Image: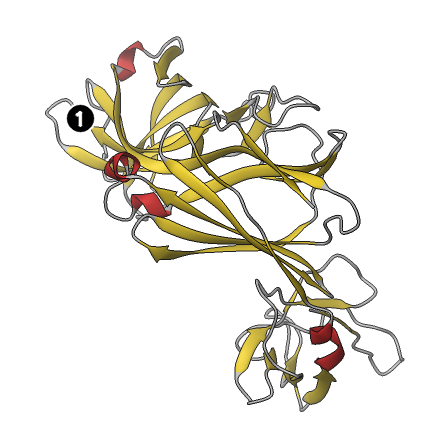
Amino acid sequence: MTIALQLFDENGKHDRHKLSIGDANKITIKDDKGNVVGSMYDMGYTSDFYYMVDFFSEPLKTDKITIEGSIGTLGQRNETLIEGNWDFSFDIDMKEANKQNKIEEMAGSYSTPHGMTVTLKRLTRMVQGVRFELETELDDAAMARSPGGLWEKQMLSFHFETTDGEEIHSVNPRKMGYMDSLMTSDHRVIGNGKMRWSYTFKYLPEDKPYRFVLDGYSVAEKDGSRITFRPSELTESQTFKIMNDRLELVRTSLEESQTNKGTYETVISFYGKMDNEISHDEWKAYDSVGKQYDVITMGTSSLVNTLTDHWREGYISMGDRRAKQPYEFRITRLDHIPEELTLVRKVVDKRYKDPDWSVLLK
């Protein structure tokens, strides 16, 4: 849902910087029973108006929605606030929009070589876009690799293409210049090892067949890969390979802590070339006597070596070599550089790119 909102000053000119949405000012969406079903925020994008939006993972089950604005202050934090009453409320009839919702049940299921079963569920065509739903389930062996809540940390990669192989949309690809019209996505646990996924796109073909292609997925799993080195020997960089990932350690330093002011922490600077994902990695550090420390990773990353006609090739580059800004392992509470250090990746965001499955959707 989108609202274009303008705020005019005493000269009749739109002021793009006076309205802040947050604790003091809110714009809520209510159903026909008065229940709050959403809250709008400013996406920016343009100086011509406030671009207020909220995304819904599924159609609202109501014949009427009410947009309520509660605006009591204008101005930014660094200036004197203007207090007043700029509240507003208006209704939107949803009956005609609801009539245009069309649900199409889908069929198709596939089990990957490493224990994930993917099942297509349904397609819902709405006024605001097209919602695509599917379910995944991990088998016992896959669940054993991801104990506790690790298995819930997943990501799917897939794309749609025409029957001639022309790309329509892609989701989480490793592809250069991919097509993207994903508006919103959501996933939730529906059972032990089971997830329900929902993706809303601006459009999907309605009058001609097209193909769904599963490109890959990732799951947080137990790892245990180790890197042991002597900081005093990092006068030249040292490269380590763990699984299909490469880390090049370039230096070790003692720096002021960014989380515990007034203290110091050991920082290991490195560049990474990662085949796996990195969002859910968990690292620990051990000093010369085996004492364990928490590790925070910081830095910028980007995709490299991707192709314009392939969805699975390429790596995540950790750190920016051109700007000479490496990624960092910041070892909290290690306030001295030990003789020897061991880094252990306790959890890897394991990427699987070996699915071989596509479904023709009509």
Residue 156, given in percent of the width and then of the height, sits at 50, 40
Whether residue 220 is situated above or below residue 337 in the rendered picture: below
Whether residue 294 is situated above or below residue 76 in the rendered picture: above
Is any atom of residue 279 visible in this view?
no
Residue 270, given in percent of the width and then of the height, sits at 42, 22
- Examine the image and state in which quarter residue 269 appears: top left
* Closer-to-camera residue (306/196): 196
Residue drawn at 28 percent across, 13 percent down: 232
Q: Residues within 10 Å of mark 1 (few under 14, many from 20)?
A: some
Is 283 placed left or right of 185 in the picture? left
- Examine the image and state in which quarter residue 342 appears: top left
Residue drawn at 61 percent across, 79 percent down: 29
* Quadrant location, the N terminus: bottom right
Residue 341, given in percent of the width and then of the height, sits at 23, 22
* Closer-to-camera residue (62/218): 62
> How is the rendered protein coloured?
secondary structure
Is any atom of residue 263 visible in this view?
yes
Residue position marked by numbered label 1 in the rendering: 287
* Name of the residue lying farthest toward the left: 289
Q: Secondary structure at mark 1?
A: loop
* Closer-to-camera residue (302/83): 302
